[in-house]
Amino acid sequence: MVTVAELAKDLNVSTSTVYRMLKSVEQSNAEPLIEKHKGTTYFTEEGEKVIREHLAPIERNDNQCSPTTIIDEQEENAEILFLREQVKELQDELSKEREFSRTQSEKITDLTDRVISQNEQLIKLNENQQILLLSEQTKNKPPLLSEITTDIEDAPHENKQGFFKRIFKKKNR
């Protein structure tokens, strides 16, 4: 009696291939094809013969592939195609996101430039407003020298004496 691993090695196939073939053949056979002893699976004489018959035509040569290998490759190819499609979809999404991000960045830059321009205009308007306020204040407020001269002119005649006359003024008794 041989084990599953020994038979797989002898037929140059994987143990999973042997187990798959065993499962499909067991359903159609009435006789037991395997026996288990202490956790190890052994083929009966009939089981070994049946599995060898089914796997003999698909023994691997260097330039031949078994049907299970072809099926496995087809499944892998289908998975690869599916994954490639997913990668392409994700790349498309990424490029759309990048384009959206780029347009948003351009909008932000444009808005920032506008804010800076408006801020500069506000600063100029504020400066102009201050200049206008100063010019209005100087128009409304007469100079100090003219105030003094008008005060002297408005004073009565008797007080229009010179400085020294007022200081050394003789008192009439």
Image: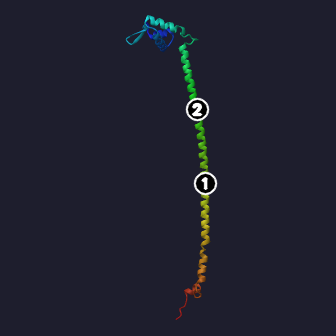
Q: What numbered label is drawn on residue 118?
A: 1
Report the residue at 60% width, 61% height from top: 127
- What percent of the width, then of the height, locates residue 47? 45, 7
- What percent of the width, then of the height, locates residue 7? 47, 9
Disc 1 vs disc 2: which is toward the camera? Answer: 2
Q: Are marks 1 and 2 in contact (CB under 8 Å)?
A: no
Quick one: 91 or 162, which is closer to the camera?
91
Quick one: 131 or 86, which is closer to the camera?
86
Circle 2 residues within 10 Å: few <14, some 14–19, many ≥20: few
Residue type at tag 2: Gln
- Residue 7 located left or right of residue 65: left
Q: Which residue corresponds to mark 2?
A: 91
Residue type at tag 1: Gln
Report the residue at 55% width, 21% height from top: 76
Query: From the viewer's perspective, is residue 61 above or below residue 101?
Result: above
Q: Secondary structure at mark 2?
A: helix
Quick one: 116 or 163, which is closer to the camera?
116
